[in-house]
Amino acid sequence: MSDVDMMPKKNPLSMQIDLSKFEKATDEEKKQQDVMSESTTFFKDSMKKLFKNPLAVFSIVVLVLIILLITIGPLVVPYGYSEILKVNGMRDKTAMNLGPFQYSENELAFMEETGIKLFPHIMGTDELSRDYFIRVIYGTRVSLSVGLFASLIVLVIGVLYGSISGYAGGRTDLIMMRIVDIIYSLPDMLVIILLSVVLKELLNDSTGIIAKLGTNMVSIFIVFGLLYWVGMARLVRGQILSVKENEYVLAAKSIGAKPKRIIWKHILPNCLSVIIITTALQIPSAIFTESFLSFIGLGVAAPMPSLGSLANNARQGLQSYPYKLLFPAMMICLIVLALNLLGDGLRDALDPKLKK
């Protein structure tokens, strides 16, 4: 007796499925079901797309090399960023404005007498007989730290403010957005100058990290916390206004979820791609702002270097020593270009609307 004959007959008035119209799966079809596609997540899929982007991979490699350089460099180079080369306790005047991989007359005499090979000045020295390579490394450290810290400030304040404004809506949203409009109208450069003057009096006797960075840099951080988060807040608000109308948010409200949990668990994860992209693009903007302010004398306090202050000092001897401007300018270009390319790559990888 065949398998078809063993199947129960369908009653003409019944709504059940007629099993006689179905066939058993063959062994080959069963094997096909065993080969299942690899489980993935949104993050894994995005990272796979990111690493298929050659420009994004190039930017990641450049950033990793720069981070390794500024981390390992001070451990290898035996000079300090504020150390003046000396001979017998006096400044070695023959070591002023040396070219790349050059030694001063006193250093050459010392190596001939003792036979000890001194560490080379990879980028030469400056007008105060300080090793230029280690100053560029510390300048890159300062600029990157400022960019990361400023972006973190923008991220925290902007996401909190935009989330509250977008979710609350109504009059609360109206008042909060008018405050944003007022902040937009404030001139950031004027605020930095005023804060530098005020903080110079208040923090005149300060010690530690504030004394090393100087009141100008502290004022830059304050201005980033006061003014530069408004763009992030507006972007997050716009995303939340569109996301909060979805059904899963209404379902969370219907079961009594609190607004804090709805924002944190349901709304912000769906805005995460936009937040990551904006933060990644904010870092080069903050680095460029810090470099510009240091270039005009509103950056870190001497002798602590930044890439902007090094470029400003190199401008004075541009005709005689052009390489002094080349090194910090090239480092600024590499960092800003790599971060911008990485931000574009993250946008292509994380934005679901751009998926093919």
Image: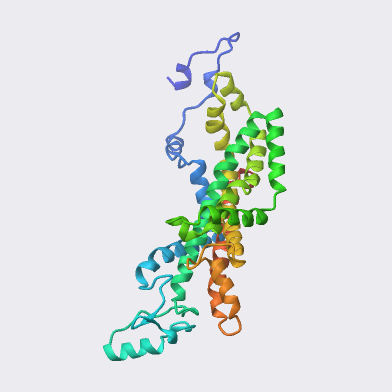
The answer, for residue 52, to whether it is visible in the render is: no
* Front in this rendered view, residue 229 or 345: 229
Which residue does the image show at 47% across and 17% down from the upper left? 7
Which residue does the image show at 60% across and 44% down from the upper left? 274
Percent x, y for residue 171?
A: 71, 28
Percent x, y for residue 66?
A: 47, 64
* Quarter of the figure with the N terminus: top left
Task: Point out the residue furthest to the top here.
Answer: 13
The count of marks equals 0
Using the rendered view, name the quadrant where residue 107 is placed.
bottom left
Using the rendered view, name the quadrant where residue 120 is placed.
bottom left
Percent x, y for residue 199?
A: 55, 53
- Rendered image coloring scheme: rainbow
Indicate whether 262 appears above or below 278.
Answer: above
**In the image, 34: left or right of 322?**
left
Which residue does the image show at 43% across and 65% down from the upper left? 70
The answer, for residue 333, to whether it is visible in the render is: yes
* Front in this rendered view, residue 167 or 183: 183
**In the image, 105: left or right of 268?**
left
Indicate whether 197 appears above or below 25.
Answer: below
Indicate whether 159 appears above or below 296.
Answer: above
Percent x, y for residue 320?
A: 58, 85
Indicate whether 87 appears above or below 31.
Answer: below
